[in-house]
Image (cartoon, rainbow, N blue to C red):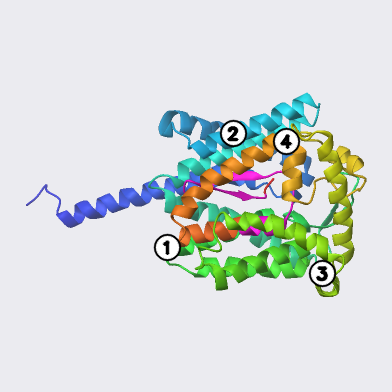
Amino acid sequence: MRGRKSVKQIRSSYKMQINKSAMSHWILFVFLTMPHINPAYLNQIPFVEALIDGCRIASFVVISLWVLFVRRRLSFVAILIIVQQLYILLVTVIYSGDIYQCIVNIFSIFSVVMLYTIGLNGADRKVFISAQLFCFECAIYINLITVLLYPDTMYVSYDSLFVATKNWFLGYYNNQTKYFIPALMFAWQYKAISGKRFRTYLLTAAIFLTAVLMWSGGILVSLFSMAFIYIFLKDWTGVFNGYSCWGIHILFWVFVYIAQTQRWIQWLVGDVLGKWNSFLLRAYLWKRMVKLICEAPILGHGIKDSVSREIEAGFNWAMHAHNMVLEILYQGGLINLFFWIVIIAVAGKVIWRKRDSIESKIIAIAWGGVVYSYIGGTFYITVFNGNVYRCILQ
């Protein structure tokens, strides 16, 4: 009958509308995320750095309006994260630290927390994961190209007393874990929900190749530990889960204690990885950090600029503690550590309840990767599927 659409036409029209809506949301997620990826190389160009900062502010405004007028609700974990970051800002103000850098960090952390709350708790979950994966793919593939083109280094940075000579698109080689771990997590989540493998395998290969070419001991240990767990332990959810991976911190300090007396560990760290001198220097730094933490055990010291941190620690490369727990205690003392424990407990409860799902297994491995990397510094705290995992991003 003329003037009437068939059921097939109606379904086709409805499907087209859904596809258009998904594409528009995908594009929006990409544009809101990209400023917070913020590759270090672009910050070497003053005009570009100012442009990115402006985009980060614009992203924060759009995301905030989206939450206020559309979603209107943040998870309890997201609220805890926001309160924690405001506490760090308060401590930074009290001790006259780097207030500007602290506020910049907070803008990005709030943006990421709110954006992940929006994207992962609704119908756009698959679209959001695809968009996040695309953002990390762009950054990591460009970085790999720069590593291949400039085998020794792409540029030298003078951001602090330490003259960093092993820099590529994503910045100093030891700090690139903050991109690799979330990229791997999103890639394998994408495979789990879509069944598509090519993007996941290609990005995984690119990350491992980049790590080998740069030869970063911390990154290699983290990546191969994650690979080992995924292959052999991911189904042992009673042993390895969102909670147990944080117990690695205890084992790590046991490892540090015995490493200086056991020849086989010296052989592994020194002869195989070529990192024994770096390990010893970090051990000296950790002793110094413990003394600094004891000076302000309750409140911590807040956020300080790189030069102040290096002078304080006595090493021109020590702009952070190079250990997650020590950095947490340094920045915010026992109160900050309490916030972390509560956030991990609340988030881990959900992961534990759904520990046999592939999504929770992947998140637990990502958590483990962060722990194994033992890198301090500024952390992005992101919300995934109602759970929190920490990616080391700046």
- Rendered location of residue 155, percent (x, y): 83, 55
Mark 4 → mark 1, Cα distance in angstroms: 40 Å
Disc 2: which residue: 82
- Rendered location of residue 295, percent (x, y): 84, 35
Which callout, 4 or 2, points to the residue nearer the camera? 4
Report helix, strand or loop for mark 1: helix
The image quarter containing residue 312 is top right
**Disc 1, disc 2: CB below 8 Å?**
no
Q: Is residue 59 visible?
A: no
Mark 3 → mark 2, Cα distance in angstroms: 38 Å
Disc 4: which residue: 332
Disc on the earlier residue, 4 or 1: 1
Mark 1 → mark 3, Cα distance in angstroms: 39 Å
Q: Is residue 342 magenta?
A: no
**Disc 3, disc 2: CB below 8 Å?**
no
Range of the magenta residues? 368-392
Mark 1 → mark 2, Cα distance in angstroms: 32 Å
Disc on the earlier residue, 1 or 2: 2
Mark 4 → mark 2, Cα distance in angstroms: 14 Å
Instruction: Specify the label residue 373 is tagged with.
Output: none
Q: Is residue 385 magenta?
A: yes
- Report the residue at 74% width, 36% height from top: 333
Disc 3: which residue: 269
Which callout, 4 or 1, points to the residue nearer the camera? 4
Disc 1: which residue: 194
Disc on the earlier residue, 3 or 2: 2
- Up the image or down, 65 lies above or below 288; here it is above
Mark 3 → mark 4, Cα distance in angstroms: 31 Å
Disc on the earlier residue, 1 or 3: 1
39 or 372, which is in the foreground?
372
